[in-house]
Image (spheres, coloured by chain):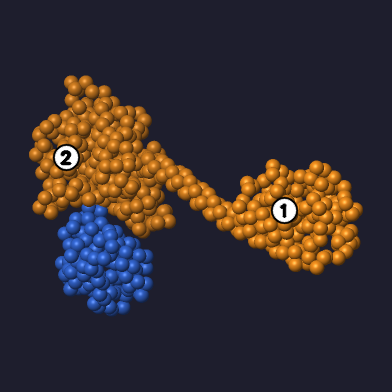
Chain colours: A orange, B blue
Amino acid sequence: MPQEGHAAVHGGKPGRWAPSAAGEASRIEAVRRYDILDTPPDGAFDRVAAMAARLFAVPVASVTIVDEDRIWFKAAHGLEGVSEISREPGLCGSAILSDETLVIPDTLTDPVACSNGLVTGPMGVRFYAAAPIITHDGHRLGTVNILDTRPRLITEDDTATLADLAAIVLDEMEMRLSALNALRVEQERRREQEEARERAERDTAAIQAFASTLQRTLLPPALPVVPGLELACHYATASPRDVGGDFYDVFPLGGGKWAFFLGDVCGKGPEAAAVTSLTRYTLRAAALIDPDPDIVLTSLNTALLLEPAVGTRFCTAVFGILEPHEEEGFAVTVATGGHPPVYHLRGHGVVEAVRPKGGMLIGALAEAHFASHTFRLAPGEGLLLYTDGLTEARTADGQMIGEEGLTGFLAARTAPVGATAVIEDTVALIDATPYGAGDDVALLALSVPFADASVDGVTANAHTIAPAGEMPESRP
Amino acid sequence: MTDFRLTTQHTDGDLVLAGIAGDLDIATAPHLRAQGLTLIGQGHRHLILDLAAVTFCDSSGFNALVGIFRCAKEPGGSLTLAAVPDRLERLLSLTGLDALLPAYPTAADALAAHARSQDTATAQ
């Protein structure tokens, strides 16, 4: 049945001619959302155009999207080589102004279409019908349209079919859009994952750099060169990651005097490391104010008792000062706070344990008292300071080396007393045990070379971190 | 976890005698410390710890004992040890704490010594 009043359908709807600027803007936004403009040809849309041409027996059918200032062909059947035309009113430009299908039986009788380029130009379009592609939120993106070069009438069923084709086109566009969105979400997720991974890697690297810097500040410093003295040390933590509770240092007091200390904070881990740090700096600072070893240890005791972690962190330490002796060598004054004795190595296997009576654990009790002892360190003699990781290393029969074992070992050692050799031999003693030291070990040796050895001061540093791995083996 | 047990064997006013059995090491030391502090919190400021059944004691166990001693001392109490293992005895001597923590061969000796010291304190 021929559709009636075609001209009226077109001209009688003033709404077709008055798109508001805001309405057009949100329509364009919808067009952009589907991201379809200027995409390559797509079989699904081509088939719709071809189907329309076949169904209506017209030479030209197309699927168009109406952009701001152009009409772009997503699919065009019978229009080879045309991808877009200008957005003139009359045909597609008018079809998207209403939800209803626009039918122009004869363009020459239509007041607007008659001047459209497709009508007046070489194509000579006389018949035009278009169903708008309407989104679910009401935006008309473009059309599915049919054109003929002869005027014609179409039935209401035909009009409905054209609208169905437009609906199929929208479904196809929705599917494309959701696939596109899923892809975008996936890409975004991957990008975020990648970013998170990169961030985590950067953070880890920063934390590791920070931790190793901190760890270096907690390690015993390199030993200085002291005129007339040979120094050597050994430091090994039970775990490469742990900053141990063992500490030592040798530093100048001015006026040719030197101070040295070695000790052990009870406990392990970061808290023990913090106490170790506090202990080292307190000993250095206290010694500069008053180097009397008794007073230095008392100051440390007070400082540790003022710590918030008081009552759980104690330490044992040996603190000593060296002054050039009026004859040769040094006068040594040593105080102990609950620490194993210092060995005075006198040469030819003569060993004396320096054990000032009554030196108490440091940082546990306000009334702790300390005791010191002064003696001469003559040329050819040395001192060995150690932490109990040495004496608690177990020999093959399961027994700890112990103080007795260490004394015996030092007494059996008849080689000349040189700090470097003493440390080397003692480390060899630990290495000879089946499991090595189970705990941290710090060793510090001082020796006075004979005058004819013409030594101005020799320092050997051996910071061995066991098990081998992530930390420097030695430091300059 | 290594085996560790603290058993209260006798109380008399502010005195408590507790027996400790098992290993005193890094794993059990916090329990020893906590349980010792609980006894003090309950009003037993004089503690006698019988270590006869202690099978192992390293510096962690020693640290816990120092913590208990510090805590007992605040209200004017004391920590007395009985049957001290060799290694702990060496640690106490090395750190000078043997002067502050009286030690006796047996729990009975420690109880008797405590009774004498209380009599002396009362007499004065």
From the top left corner, tell me how far across and down residue B31 is, in percent: 31, 67
Q: Is residue A345 above or below residue A267?
A: above
Report which residue position mark 2 lands on.
Answer: A428
Q: Residue A316: x and y, percent?
A: 29, 49
Looking at the picture, does residue B11 appear above or below residue A54?
A: below
Dot 1: chain letter: A
Instruction: Pick the quarter of the image with the N terminus of chain B.
Output: bottom left
Give the SS element for disc 2: helix
Near-viewer residue (A49 or A273): A49
Q: Residue at x 10, y 34 (%)?
A: A414
Taking the image as shown, residue B7 lies to the left or right of residue A46, namely left
A362 or A79: nearer the viewer: A79
Residue under label 1: A61
Of badges 2 and 1, the one in the foreground is 1
Asked which secondary structure carries label 1, the reply is strand
Between the C-alphas of marks 2 and 1, the distance is: 95 Å
Q: Are marks 2 and 1 on the same chain?
A: yes
Chain of the residue that carries numbered disc 2 in the rendered image? A
Circle number at residue B51: none
Q: Is residue A72 left or right of residue B99?
A: right
The C terminus of chain B lies in quadrant: bottom left
A159 to the left or right of A451 = right
Report crowding for label 2: few under 14, some 14 to 19, many 20 or more residues within 10 A (C-alpha). few
Residue at the image point whose x is 63% and y is 58% from the top: A172
Whether residue A98 is visible: no
Pinpoint residue A173: horizontal percent, then vertical percent. Answer: 65, 57
Q: Earlier in the sequence, mark 2 or mark 1?
A: 1
Q: Position of residue A129 (x, y in %)?
A: 78, 57
Give, as a three-letter code, the residue at label 2.
Ala
Residue at 35 percent of width and 58 percent of height = A312
